[in-house]
Image (cartoon, rainbow, N blue to C red):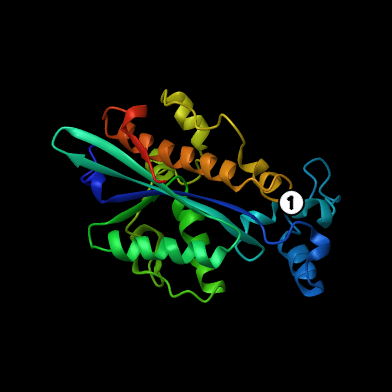
Amino acid sequence: MNLPVSKENILFLDIESVPEVENYSELPEVKKELFALKTKYQRKSKTSFETEIPVEEFYENAGIWAEFGKIVCISVGYFVTQGSARSFRVKSFYGDDEALLLGEFKELLENHFNGPKHLLCGHNGKEFDFPFIARRMIIKSINLPVKLNLFGKKPWEVPHLDTLEMWKFGDFKHYTSLKLLTTILEIPSPKDDIDGSQVAHAYYKEKNLERIAKYCEKDTIAVAQLFLRFNNESLLREEELVFAE
């Protein structure tokens, strides 16, 4: 694609979210009603449109909506080039305190990725990750950083990158998962442990935030690999990956 963007100016990222509480029964009554209304169409059976999936069973999907979910991990990565040497630095913000991890992520943006040339990049980031983070910041009363304050901008005016959008080549109805893209482009798959549908279980049942962070970091690396592949650059080697302590 020969993108006119310096990869050193890009912050690659991925997020993992879960339902705000473990079980539907824990929601306040008003939020139970609102969740039922919000998901009424999605709960229609694929085999019989007259049949609805019980809202209690469907609640396990609540993490995909910022109004009913919360972020438990944001993983980021960025390129550092020194002469002919290249490295990719990876760091995760994760924990039970969503406001704290959002604040730490905001600090990174404001201190290191706040210039006019800086961009965010995710897979389906414009439709999911970027607005989800912004909505959760507002819910947690955190002032939006400049890079996420996109009020008034049309979708095509958002100055960020999205590897899904790149792959669409203008075909707006087309969706390709990160796993499928990494497979067909012969990029080492990041999906060798859990997948997105298992994150809530790992969080609420296993209490294993470290496992979630590792999964999230692999997706972040995969997004960076896609960017390199689209630009016909060599893929990252394991020795080029640097993980924050």
Image coordinates for residue 118, horizontal then vertical, percent: 27, 57
Residue beneath the point at 59% across and 32% down: 193
Camera-nearest residue between 225 and 238: 238
Position of 136 with respect to 197 (left or right) is left
Residue beneath the point at 25% across and 51% down: 9
Image coordinates for residue 153, horizontal then vertical, percent: 38, 67
Q: Quadrant of the N terminus?
A: top left
Image coordinates for residue 220, horizontal then vertical, percent: 44, 42
Q: Count of labels shown?
A: 1
Residue type indicated by callout 1: Glu
Camera-nearest residue between 153 and 244: 244
Whether residue 101 can be seen here: yes
Q: Is the residue 122 above or below the residue 86 in the image?
A: below
Quadrant in the rendering for residue 164 = top left
Position of 166 with respect to 101 (left or right) is left
Q: For mark 1, does the 10 Å Cα neighbourhood hold few (<14), some (14 to 19), or many (20 or more) residues? A: some
Quadrant in the rendering for residue 106 = bottom left
Q: Is the residue 214 above or below the residue 118 in the image?
A: above
Quadrant in the rendering for residue 21 = bottom right
Taking the view exactly as shown, the residue that stands out farthest to the left is: 83
Image coordinates for residue 242, horizontal then vertical, percent: 35, 39
Tag 1 residue: 60
Residue beneath the point at 28% across and 59% down: 112
Camera-nearest residue between 22 and 41: 22
Residue beneath the point at 23% across and 35% down: 86
**Helix, strand or loop under label 1:** helix
Taking the view exactly as shown, the residue that stands out farthest to the front is: 245
Whether residue 113 can be seen here: no
